[in-house]
Amino acid sequence: MIKRDLLEELLAAALSTGGDFAEVYAEHTRNNGIQFVDGKIDRITDNVLSGVGIRVFLNQRTVYASTSDLTREGLLRCARSAADALGEGNAQISICLKPQTVIDSHPVRINPCNAENSYKTNILKKACCTAAEHSELITQVQGTLAGVDHEILVANSDGLLVEDRHVRTRIVVNAIASKDGENQSGSCAPGRGMGMELFELFDPSEVGKRAAEMALVNLRADYCKAGQMTVAIENGFGGVIFHEACGHSLEATQVGVGMSEMCGKLGQKIANEKITAIDDGTIPNAWGSVNVDDEGNPTRRNVLIENGVLKGYMIDRLGSRRMGMPMTGNSRRQSYVYEPTSRMTNTFIDNGPDRNEDIISSIEYGLYAREMGGGSVNPLTGAFNFSVREGYMIRNGKICEPVRGASLIGTGSQILQDIDMVGQNLATGQGMCGSSSGNVPTDVGQPLIRVKKITVGGR
Amino acid sequence: MDFDAVKDCLIQEANRAGLEEYEVYFMESSGMSTETLKNEISSFSSGVSGGVSFRCVVNGKMGSAATELFTEEEMKALVTRAMDGAKYIENEDRAILYAGAERYETVKVPESLIPDAAAVKKIALEIQERTYSESQWITDGTQSGVFCDQISMELMNSHGLHLSHRVSMSGAYAQAVIQKDGESQDAFDFTLNLDSDSLTAVSSRATQEALSKVGTVDISSGKYDVILGGKQMRSLLSAFSPIFSAKNAQLGLSLLKGREGELVANPIVTLMDDPLREDCPMQTAFDGEGVATRRKAVIKNGVLNTLLYDLATAYKAGVESTGNGQRVGYAENVTIRPYSFYLAGGTVSETELRETMGDGVYITELKGLHSGCNAVTGDFSIESAGYKVRNGKLCEAIKSFTIAGNFFELLKGIEGMANEVHFGIPSGFTVYGAPDVMIRQMSVAGK
């Protein structure tokens, strides 16, 4: 993307005012999207993002400058502006970069950005038309087929030079069911860090059918009653509970500045002993996987909680300096415009000891959350919220009538103690996680779990 | 290549490809921001990025593609990609490239200080120092920041339209963290005015709010009269703003479809959309399609006056575009969005509104609106924080609870509004505002 001698020159310029470490991040990203609505292909987008971000460290201070001007002058101006924002001087520094080979653990067969539009529109139409034809009550279907081809280069003043490429593909189908002037929605949105071979794993028709079914369930559902109750949360995107309730509080972004309820708790029992939680950026072709993170470090499998005991945090370079602990391959950013920070990759609660049928039959009165929506957390207090997209009441150990409009609220430290049953059907769901370094793809996951008591918002 | 060279190259390529209708949209944004931690600048960042989008009409369909890579080869590819995309478009939208309005309003942007890097750092450190001096309970983790952004854009098309615009905005914030009685709490506040009084007020408001959250009590689940604080009402308005898009209405994704002229809110409710609000830094006289923008009441005295239209939806509905076809980034498709979108204030003060309510809940925080609100159904169920109100007086802070309801019902159920409208931080050209509003018998889930 940028020649080695120019990279060395940029790093030297960035360090010329007293910085102790400098890094150049370059990217060339192609974003391809096809949108379907109202029975027709509505829009096709095809965008190229291309730019460079230069970061300089001095102890625990950082300066970041970015530009889309990739001329030699533009890049040197960017490096110099970062250096000038850090301090004064004109030190002559020599950098020697050593290119490293990246082993690709996430091979791609059919790059979605190079595939023919006709091929892609057919897949999207198949998914959306299946949803539309599923019932007369389905009144609208929106769909998106998105492909990203993301090439990155990271060079730093330690001599590291790596280049990598991440490709991902995702289909999203939203179905609306309507009756008597009321709308309800359902969705299905599988994605992977792979190409169009995604559709060998997910039949587009099944994706459309699932979205339609959820909308229909919600259309016949009554409002969920509010109050505290026992809740069983299904696998897959249900793992958003751990992502929000605990994951963000284990990121160095928060822990490194003392803004997390998980600070200083390493080695302590913070969760029920049935909980083992992992962040693993190495899972082949998973949605949140990459070979190297956005600081050029290989991703790895990080055990966060083992049998209820806090074992580790997710740490980037700045966090490493602040916390005095090694980096964990979790540095991520949406694009070159953002300074990277510690983020989750594929984060999940591992399978536990309980049989799934025992979890449901153990609940006399409660809520079964089959599909979760998104949520948010305040890492300082651990207070979190998330929405239930498809839910059912449980009575006398049986899943009964559907309910809608429920949300779950609580605090991370409390819910980790209150998850008292962990099932055995671990699966993941795909999300886009937003934080200070932008939106990045992350997998959430878990098996079916039981929370003995949580506040359910409803009416 | 600079933008002029990019433009020339694209025009040449468009002509070579035999395109009769095409458009070039250029946007460059630059910005600077800094953040403090303890008594030091912990980070400083600056950036410049610019990109160009090319749209063209092929056989009556609109194709588009965008790039940040300014090379001749890429410009050729850009035209090819836009033309190829157009072949697969099936919608029946009229593909319109606009020839221009007879007249565009003059933008009167308030004079704002665009500080340099040294000033940005100095201001951030000053806020941090002030925040630390606000209370003995302030603790590390407290952060202050300053940001400034400039955006310039240029729109030209084959009909001879050529418009350009430049806007800038700067602001500062404090995130106060306090530790008191074994409890940690935080609060955020901001200002878009960098004068000394505004900066002092930011430190003070953030600290006082964080302190007021300590020592919370439970609330039992049930129905309560509530006042949604202006900041919370504007967040709710933001989450449900897609219901006012004519595109969503035409697709059956908004329950306001076909309801123009009907009573959709309590008659005390007037909802304005103002692209030229004088004290807003992000004003514009034209939208992303080149249509002249204008001030309008979307809801007037409870009646839905108009939805928000771009050219294609207006053509379909047989009305004029309202100038709401926005393009915030160079790569963004035309998307219907409001500008300064706010509920007009009522006649009573915030204190008087609480006295009118008597007993109930005053809501000062709503969280996770991106997941707790469903714009298609209008339903919401949201994590909240606030205070108990007795005899019109603010009392104890309440532990985390949720409020739930339906936005369409809420609009009709607004029984009182205070006179001060609170605006947020603009995102692109959009900023939301609302006064405190009173709603009777809202569902609250607590203990």
Image (cartoon, coloured by chain):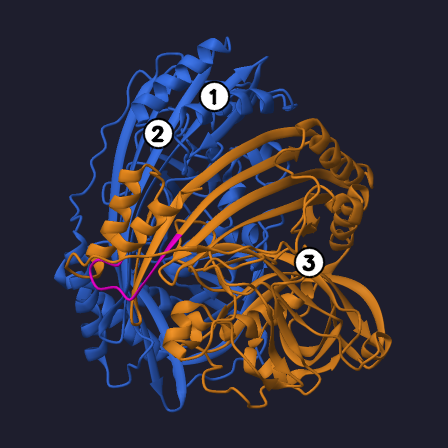
Chain A painted colour? orange
Give the CA separation, mark 2 to mark 3: 50 Å
- SS category of the residue bearing label 1: helix
| Residue at point 30%, 82% (across, down) | B139
Chain of residue at mark 3: A
Looking at the picture, how far across and down is residue B113, in whole percent?
Answer: 15, 49
Q: Looking at the rendering, which quadrant does residue A396 occupy?
A: bottom right
Looking at the picture, how far across and down is residue A233, in whole percent?
Answer: 72, 70
Q: What amino acid type is highlighted by mark number 2?
A: Thr
- Both labels 1 and 2 in a single chain: yes
Q: Main secondary structure of the magenta part?
A: loop
Chain B painted colour? blue
Q: Residue A17 in magenta? A: yes
- Discs 1, 2 touching: Cβ within 8 Å: no
Of the two numbered discs 1 and 2 in the rendering, the one whose residue sits closer to the viewer: 1
Residue at numbered disc 3: A284
- Both labels 2 and 3 in a single chain: no
- Name the residue nearer the viewer: B132 or B198: B132
Q: Name the disc covering residue B76, or none.
A: 1
Q: What amino acid type is highlighted by mark number 3?
A: Pro
B384 vs A120, left or right, is: left
Does residue B421 appear anywhere in the picture?
A: no
Chain of residue at mark 1: B
Give the CA separation, mark 1 to mark 2: 33 Å
Residue at numbered disc 2: B293
| Residue at point 57%, 60% (across, down) | B372
Give, as a single range, the part of the protein colored magenta.
A15-24
